[in-house]
């Protein structure tokens, strides 16, 4: 049960970081690049993006919260002893492989979240400063 909870939080952090890209970063980046018609087409096909964009502060707060919980669970919490058997001929146990993949997915999710935050909140003020 405990591993299912960890897996759920890992998957949730990935989807929340992707949602910050879809709702906030991608449309802002397309508008900055002069592709406003593309944004209008995307919003007409996927109208829930409007609701996400209107509440982007909450989306980012939730995404950072879930990401923080995931970092805590993966790096800082004391791991319980889980019996992972070594398979003859394999260098790693299934637990080691799963842990490595969890870390890879976590860092990809965190990178997507930071990109979304940068484009949503920092890119336009930086570009205006150079005008």
Image (cartoon, rainbow, N blue to C red):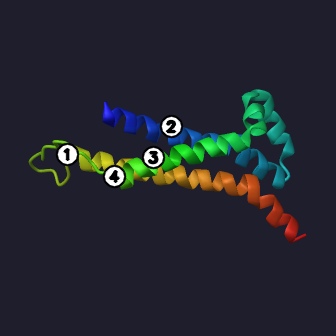
Mark number for residue 54? none
Q: Secondary structure at mark 4?
A: helix
Q: Report which residue position mark 2 lands on.
A: 12
Query: Mark 2 touching mark 4, by CB under 8 A?
Result: no
Taking the spot 38% from the left edge, 50% from the top edge, the residue there is 74
Between tags 1 and 4, which lies in front? Answer: 1
Horizontal arrangement in the rendering, residue 92 relative to residue 109 (left or right): left
Q: Report which residue position mark 1 lands on.
A: 81
Q: Secondary structure at mark 2?
A: helix
**In this orientation, which residue lies closer to the viewer: 62 or 128?**
62
**In this orientation, which residue lies closer to the viewer: 126 or 75?**
75
Between tags 4 and 3, which lies in front? Answer: 3
Q: CA distance from mark 4 to mark 3?
A: 14 Å
Mark number for residue 70? 3
Between tags 1 and 2, which lies in front? Answer: 1
Q: Report which residue position mark 4 lands on.
A: 100
- From the top left corner, tell me how far across and down residue 77 is, in percent: 34, 51
Q: How many marks?
A: 4
């Amino acid at each position: 049960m405990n591993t299912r909870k960890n897996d759920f939080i890992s998957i949730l952090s990935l989807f929340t970081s992707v949602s910050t890209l879809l709702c906030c970063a991608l449309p802002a980046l397309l508008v900055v690049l002069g592709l406003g018609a593309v944004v209008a087409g995307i919003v007409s096909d996927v109208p829930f993006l409007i609701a996400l964009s209107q509440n982007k502060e909450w989306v980012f707060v939730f995404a950072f919260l879930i990401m923080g919980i995931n970092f805590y669970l993966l790096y800082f919490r004391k791991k319980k002893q889980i019996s992972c058997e070594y398979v003859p001929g394999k260098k790693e146990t299934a637990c080691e492989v799963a842990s490595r993949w969890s870390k890879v997915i976590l860092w990809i999710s965190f990178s997507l979240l930071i990109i979304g935050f940068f484009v949503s909140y920092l890119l336009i003020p930086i570009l205006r400063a150079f005008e």
